Amino acid sequence: MKNRNIDFSMVLALAVHDMKNSLGMLLNSLDELRAENEDKLNDSSRFNTLQYEAERIHNDLVQLLGIYRLGENNLSAHMEEHFVPDFLAEHLSRHTPLLEGLDIKCSIEADEINGFFDADLLTGALNNTINNAIRYTKTRIRLTANERDGFLVIGVEDDGEGYPENMQHTGTLNFKSLDFNTGSTSLGLFFVSAVADLHSEGERTGYIKLHNGGHLGGGVFEIWLP
């Protein structure tokens, strides 16, 4: 009998990678379709739902690949200097068509500061957070950035009902704390927390903070990077 000692986790990772690339192409096609038929599709709830869910699945796959690499000790942060307002504006632009279609107003209030971080990892983390805000907001989302206590703090706020008490958190999430017996595993938050933790300077490491209030009165997500 031939050797069938298959690395199943590697097979899954390769399959997830292929699905992620396919969904990326689908999302590009949806953006082009919206641009070509803006008058018809911007007010289409079915099209907006299709684009939102496709984006959410794409982000889930990005997170799964990141968590797989984390488990293989093959995920690290490549620090580069970025002008934070430009980074946020560029990042938000990819969400603009969907936000406009859903009639959600989004603003950026960022101090003119530079930050050292891995742009790809932070993009994946913010995609998760913005998609979550889109799901639970009523009409508005606000991106913020400032320096506090020697940390770069990037925030995503919404005017929804806010985080339930059991989700409000400061620090780093432990994988063992995830609950796979409920409908929400907080896997996305674990990924974002891991991204923050990969950013370090001396004795300090990044972390996340979830609370309610803020400028819009709903949920407030913050990622603190040293």
Image (cartoon, rainbow, N blue to C red):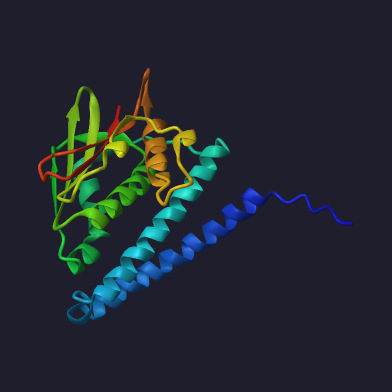
User: Which quadrant of the structure image shows residue 222?
Assistant: top left
The answer to whether 2 appears left or right of 88 in the picture is right
The answer to whether 35 appears left or right of 24 in the picture is left
Please name whichever residue, 35 or 185, is drawn nearer the observer in this view of the structure: 185
**Up/down of 58 relative to 65, above or below:** below
Please name whichever residue, 208 or 119, is drawn nearer the observer in this view of the structure: 208
Residue at the spot 20% in from the left edge and 82% down from the top edge? 40
**Up/down of 99 relative to 71, above or below:** below
Please name whichever residue, 132 or 41, is drawn nearer the observer in this view of the structure: 132
Residue at the spot 53% in from the left edge and 62% down from the top edge? 18
Residue at the spot 41% in from the left edge and 60% down from the top edge? 57
**Up/down of 213 relative to 202, above or below:** below
Residue 200 x/y as whole percent: 38, 26
Residue 36 x/y as whole percent: 25, 80
The answer to whether 108 appears left or right of 26 in the picture is left
Residue at the spot 18% in from the left edge and 51% down from the top edge? 160
User: Which quadrant of the structure image shows residue 147?
Assistant: top left
Q: Can residue 74 be spotted in the picture? A: no
The answer to whether 106 appears left or right of 163 in the picture is left
Query: Image quadrant for the N terminus?
Result: bottom right
Residue 44 x/y as whole percent: 23, 77
User: Which quadrant of the structure image shows residue 73?
Assistant: top right
**Up/down of 212 relative to 39, above or below:** above
